Amino acid sequence: MTTLANCSTRSISQDPAVSRPAAVRALLVADTVVDPIGRFLADPVNAPAIQAQIAPYNQVRQILLDTEHPAWRQSQDFSESPNLLIIWTTPAAAVPAFAGLLEFRGADVESILAEVDELADAILSSASRAPWVFVVSWTLPPYRRWVQARSMRHETGAANVLMRMNLRLAERLAPAKNIVLLDSQYWHASLQRPSHDPKLQAMAQVSYSRDLFVKAAAEIKAVYRGLRGQGRKLVICDLDNTLWGGILGDDGIDGLQLGGHDGIGQSFAGMQCELLSLRRRGVLLAVCSKNDHQAAIDAIERHPEMLLRLADFVSLRINREDKAANVEAILRELNLLPQSAVFLDDHPAERDRVRRAFPEMLVPDLPQDIAAYPSFVASLDCFEAGEQTTEDQARTELYRIESKRRAARAAAGDSVQAWLESLNIRVTILPLDRINLPRAAQLLNKTNQFNMSVRRMSDDELWRWSSQPGRTALLFSVADRFGDSGITGLITSELRGDGSAALVDFVMSCRVMGKQIEDAILARMCRRLTEAGATSISASCVQTDKNEPVRAFLAGKYASPPLLDLSRVGAPGHIAIESREN
Amino acid sequence: MPVFERVQNVLARVMQVPQQQVRLESRKDDFAHWDSIRHLDLIMEIENAFSCTLTMNEATAIGSVRDVVDLIAKKVAA
């Protein structure tokens, strides 16, 4: 069979049965056989349809450096110059010195990087030939297992040097603002099926599987859409079984599944986390829910495990009206078009309603398994945005945050204390109430490492215990400037009539250990007890094979166990405490 | 949908011809676009449509619509 390597310049045209005017013309220059991608780029179902002309195989440098090369002269299918130049090279072919390293023939990193520079110069020289130039970054062939003990070794390992090559390429191409370096590592990593098909390799020197080509085409289109300002700007979400588990009207705020240690609650927390992440990227969030308005507002604002709060949403339509009408009202309010929005709802009938009303809106089916909700949202490729089209407000905020981070990192240097101080940790102390009771019980029952007395209690047992005179139960939630960890600890105490007090429970999630938050909490509780008349405070710590962290912490606080030495208990200055205690 | 109709569908799409032009007795030479590139496309689309994997021998042996239908029947039965 004739291999594709021998074929001359070809134009991949789309199926005439679904032919539409081509929106985007691309010239694809490659040193590997990528012809199969042409069909997927041309597919009009995933807009834009990209008509790709594939230049003669393995003549990348010749084409890029020779302005008169025949590949630049448009074939009969192209009456105008390309909108997009795609340069797809492979590391061993594009950088021969790297092939030497890969094949154990030896090579030094300087020669390799010199060849990268040479290729970068060739790419830069052709950057003006198209409005946008996409350069596919380098990956190792996925089937090749290089020596794993050495692959990441500094300047000699294949993976290590490949990273250097990609970084160098990115650095060299950075000045050209119309060049986009595409992360092909992500293409391979995100596939659930092999990215290489040995049969295609053997038959026609095609190094990639169909799935990889489908993914690459989708990503190229997504990035192109983003650069053209066609990324989606708004996510309209349902509430029940979309942002939280359960039906607010039936289950009440206390019965919602959100956060905590169970898989369902974690999935919805993960979903919110992904949406929050989108909000931070500049994507607007709105709520469209058939619910009692006030009850939903209360749940959003007061449920302790909500990551998204009212301030995160730009529009709320919470009522019993038709969802399509509500969606329309949201779009009108925000002055956005349906093609700018995504609608997320667990209910198939509601999705169908909105899909029919707004064919241009993205209304994806949510995964059957709610465990996949967070990764589903995280994998959506419709929010792509180039620097030029990012909304000004979001850009300003992003730059401001990034600038603060840089300053903090630089100022912190190597000092742990300086780093802790830079984190801007905020601890909020909350009294135990009916809403946070399930989370408190979860902390008691699931925490092992930082758990002083390892009392396992049900919600009701904990509630009854804490309701007795002299007893106090406080929860604390932790946030820093990088995010909100939610309610991550519980401390309880008992003050007796003779003035002696005892800490009964002290549990803290391992997620927030190591930041001296435990010191702040202990100091807070001791101060509270002292102000209430305690003359001594004890803290009996049971010993388990897992709770060494809490024992180590308390070991430094005793006068003689279990009595605490209050002179050794103090709140660190880098933690701000907000109290909502009774 | 019967195997032949599904194969007909895939072939018509890959070879860019109307579906009725894909007959059981059609051979490679009957399709203007069936070159080495389209052959690869055909293999990829058959594997995708029928959720199967062809070996290289099976893939290279395809020379007609009947070859595809027989191969799929064999794969499904296996």
Image (cartoon, helix red, strand yellow):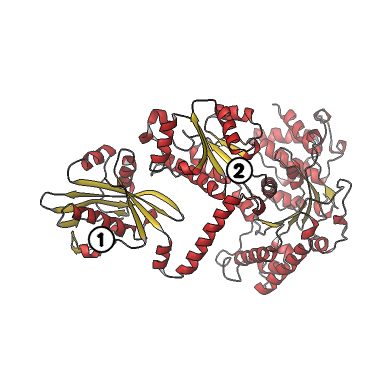
Label 1 is found on which chain of the structure? A
The residue identified by callout 1 is A554
Give the number of marks.
2
Q: Which residue is drawn at 30% across and 46% down?
A: A444
Task: Say the numbered circle drawn on residue A582.
Answer: none
In the image: residue A453, left or right of residue A412:
left
Give the secondary structure at mark 1.
helix
Q: Residue at x 38, y 40 (%)?
A: A302
Residue type beneath disc 2: Lys
> Residue A513 at x, y = what percent?
36, 57
Mark 2 or mark 1, which has the lower sequence index? 2
Q: Residue at x 61, y 49 (%)?
A: A391
The residue identified by callout 2 is A233
Please say whether residue A122 is visible from this viewpoint.
yes
> Residue B61 at x, y = what percent?
78, 42
Observer-nearest of A190 and A130: A130
> Residue A420 at x, y = what percent?
40, 63
Mark 2 in CB contact with mark 1 (< 8 angstroms): no
Give the secondary structure at mark 2.
loop
